[in-house]
Image (spheres, helix red, strand yellow):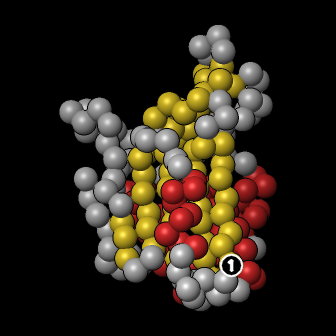
Amino acid sequence: MTTFTESRAGLPDDPLRAASPPPPVDATDPHPESAPAIAAGFEVRVQHAPIDAGAELAPIVRNPNVGAVVNFLGVVRKEGDVDDVVALEVEHYPTMTEQALWSIVEEATARWRLEAVRIVHRVGRIPLGQPVVLVVVAAAHRASAFDACEFLMDFLKTHAPFWKKEIRHDGESGWVEAKAHDDLAMRRWG
């Protein structure tokens, strides 16, 4: 496990695409996870465990400087690149993923005055209807919180090194392809 709390600058020039197979990982660790990267209200975590949105939000809303909390909870849906999805298999490249997530949190805090950011992303097999990702952004005012949350999600969809495979009811599967509309959404941030 690795903890990231120091500065991580820059994003890769050639981001990994979601449809590419993942790079090899340490085969001796069947469940590579990251320790949370925490710095003064800012946290990045990759985990196998289910996401408890209420528990993740609770400490953030208690901050007396917070006037707005915006969150995005992405869940496994039935219709995706393949029909009749029953689960999503999410893989990542430990350390690289956390570094990429931390760098975009730093970019968001450079653009907006934020009180807290929390990104929790699951890996492994995730059943239909279960959360895959939670992004929480807290600020004194709603405009900053909304904009930063949307910015973070656009980054996650286009640059974060996760690989997703949709599993159908019959056991067939397929890698999730990168979407042109996600790339277009990310371009608006410059």
Query: Position of 124 compared to 153: left or right?
Result: left
User: Would residue 62 appear left or right of 177 to someone viewing this image?
Assistant: left
Q: Position of residue 2 (x, y in %)?
A: 26, 58
Q: Residue at x 65, y 53 (%)?
A: 73
Classify residue 182 as left or right of residue 161.
right
Front-lying residue, 180 or 139:
139
How many numbered circles does the render carry?
Answer: 1
- Return the residue found at the far left: 28
Asked if 160 appears above or below 70 in the picture, the reply is: above
The residue at the point 74 percent across, 81 percent down is: 142
Q: Residue furthest top?
A: 170
Residue 103 seen in render: no
Q: Give me the residue at 45% from left, 76% from top.
A: 41
Residue 58 on image: x %, y %: 53, 65
Instruction: Name the residue tied to disc 1.
Output: 68
Three-letter code, disc 1: Ala
Residue 118 versus residue 169 in the image, above or below:
below
